[in-house]
Amino acid sequence: MEEETKKQGAGAKIKGFIMGILGAVKRFFVDNWKKPAEGNYVSSREVVCYSAGGIGVQFIAAMAGYVTLSASCLLIGSIYGIPPTTLAYMTIANSLVMLVLQPLKAWLIDNTPGKQGKARSWLLWLSVPSAVLMSALAFMDPSWKQTTIVIVITVLYVIMNWIYQFYYSQYTLLAYLISPNSQERANIITISSLVYSIAPTITGFIVPLIAEAFPGGQLDINLYRVIIPVFCGIGVLLTLIAYFGTKERVIVPREYKAKVKFWDGMKKCAKNKYLWILNITIWFQFGRIAVTGVITWVYIYILQNAAIQSVVTLIMGTASGIGMFIAPFIIKAIGKRNTAIASNMVVAISSVVLIIFPDNLPVLFITSYLVYMGIAVQIISQPAMNADALDYQQYKTGDRFEGVSGNLGMIGQAIAMGTGLLIPFIQELFGVGVGGDYEMLYDPAVRAPMFRTLAIVAAVCGLLCAAPFFFWDLSEKKHKAIIDELKLRAEAQNIADGHGGESVLSSGEELSAEETARLEEEAMQQLGTSVNASAAAEEAVAAQECGTCDSKSAEESCAAPGEEENSGGGEDGGESSGSADDGEMK
C-alpha cells in the first residue's frame, strides 16, 4: 500500500512537471506572443526575433573564430605559417588601432542619427561589411613571402575586426535597451543565448565533416574559402530579423535629444564604480581561456579523427547551453553579484585540477567543459550587470552613455597589449610554433608541461576575475528603485514640456493605464511641491524688499511687482522644476 502511494505521488509530480512545461509553452507562444506578460515590456514574438537575429550574429562570430590572430587558428597560424610571437605583435597592432578608434565608435553610438535607436541601426549597417571583409581573409596566397602576408593580413584584419566588433557589440547592446526591467533583460539574454548557441554548435559539428571532402582536411585553405562566405551570408540574412522585429525601450522624456560630449562623458563615467568593476574583471578574462584554447590542437594533433572531433565538439557545446540555461535561475536565487563570483570560482577551481593532471585527456575535457559552463553563466550575468550600471549612470547624471562607457575599456585594451603576449610567450617557451612549426604538439613530453602552465594562468585569472565583484552593491532591489525614479523624472519632464500622460519609453509604447496614472499623479505632486516652494521663496524676497520701504506709497509700488512676480513665479517655478529634472535627464 505504501509503495503504491509512493508511485502515485511520483506520478503526480511527473504530471505536474509536464503540465508546468506545457503551461510555460502556452504562455510564451499564445498568451504573450503579441502582448508582454504583466510587469514586462517585451512580447514573445519580439524575443523570438531577437534570438533569430542572434543566430545570424553568432554564425558570423563563429567564422571570426576561424580567422583569429592566434597560433591555435589553423588558417592564420598553420596554413599561412605565422609564428605565435609574430601573431602576438599583429594583435598588438590591432589593439592600438582599436584603442585609437574607440572614441569614434563611442561617439557614433551615443549620437546615432535617426529614430531606429542606438543599437539596431548599426546592427543593420555593419553586417554586410563584416561578412565581406571576414571572407576576404581566406583568400590570401600562402606562397607569399611571410613579410608580405603578415602586412596584408594585419591591415585587412584590423579593418575587419573594428567593423566586426562594432557590429557584434550592437547585438549585445540591444539587449541592454530592449527592456528597462532587469530580470526580464536577463531572461531575454538567456533565451536568446540558448537559441543562438545553435550557430556555433552547427558549425562546430559540420565543419570537421565538410573538411573530410577536402584533400588537406582542416589544413586545406579551400575549406575556409567555402565555409566563411556561406555562413557569413546566412548570418547577414538572419541579422535582418533582429533589426526589423525588435524595439529599443529607454526611459527618457519625449523631447529628449542625445548630445554627448567626449570629455564630459568620460568624467561622468569615471565616477561610476560599477563600470569600473566590470572593466577591471575584463582585464583578466584573457587568461580564463588559456586551457580551452588548446582544444583545437588536441583535435588535430592527438585525436586525429574528424568523427570523434564532431561528437566531442557537440558534447562540449552543451556546456554553454547548460550554463546559459541555469543562469537566470541562479541570478533569481542569489543575485547577479554572487552569480558572477561563483561562476568565476568554478573556472578557477576547474583549472586547478588540470594543474595536477596536465596530460590526462578526460581531465582536460572535463576541465574545459566546466570552464565553458562557468563562462556561459557570465554570458548572461555580465551584460545584465552592465545594463544595470548604465541605468545607474542615468540615475546619477541624467545621461545615457552606452557608447562613452566603452571608453573605460581603452585601459583594458592597453593592458591587453601586454597580457596578450603571455600565452603566446608560454607556447613558444615550449617550442610550439617556432619557425611556423607545430609538429612538436604530437609529443606528450612537450604538451604536458605547457598544459600545466596554461592551467596555472587560467586558475589565477579566474580568481582575479571574481575579486572585483565583492565590491558590487547594486542589488536587484536598488536597481528597481532606480528605474521607478527614472520613470517619475521622465513623466515630470513630459508634464513640464506639455506632454503629460505620454509615453516615457523611447519606443513610444504606453505603460499600463494604472502605472501611467500613478506616475502622472506623483509627478504632478512633485512639480506642485517645487512650484509652491519657488513661490514661497519669491514671496519672502518680495517681503524683505518691501520691508526696506519708508512710505506707504513705496510699499505699494514695491508690492505690485512682487505680486506680478509671484503670479508669474509660479509658472517659472514649474518650468524651473522641469529644468531641474531636465538637467538630471539631459
Image (tube, rainbow, N blue to C red):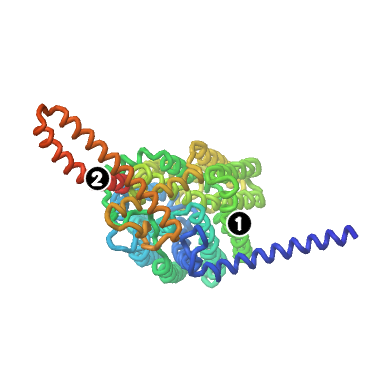
At horizontal 88% and vertical 58% (from top left) the residue drawn is 2
- The residue under label 1 is 322
Q: Is residue 470 visible?
A: yes
Q: Nearer the viewer, residue 538 or 514?
A: 538
Report the mark closest to the observer, 2 or 1.
2
Secondary structure of residue under mark 2: helix
Locate residue 282 relative to residue 491 in the image: left or right.
Answer: right
> Identity of the amino acid at label 2?
Gly
Locate residue 573 relative to residue 218 in the image: left or right.
Answer: left
Chain-order first, disc 2 or disc 1: 1
Q: In the image, residue 528 lies at what x, y percent?
A: 32, 46
Secondary structure of residue under mark 1: helix
Q: What whole-number distance in Å separates the C-alpha atoms at marks 2 and 1?
A: 60 Å
Q: In the image, residue 518 lies at what x, y percent?
A: 42, 53
At horizontal 63% and vertical 63% (from top left) the residue drawn is 311
- Binning the other alpha carbons within 10 Å of mark 2 as few (below 14), some (14 to 19) or many (20 upward) gives many
At horizontal 20% and vertical 46% (from top left) the residue drawn is 568
Q: Nearer the viewer, residue 384 or 421?
A: 384
- The residue under label 2 is 570
Q: Is residue 139 visible?
A: no
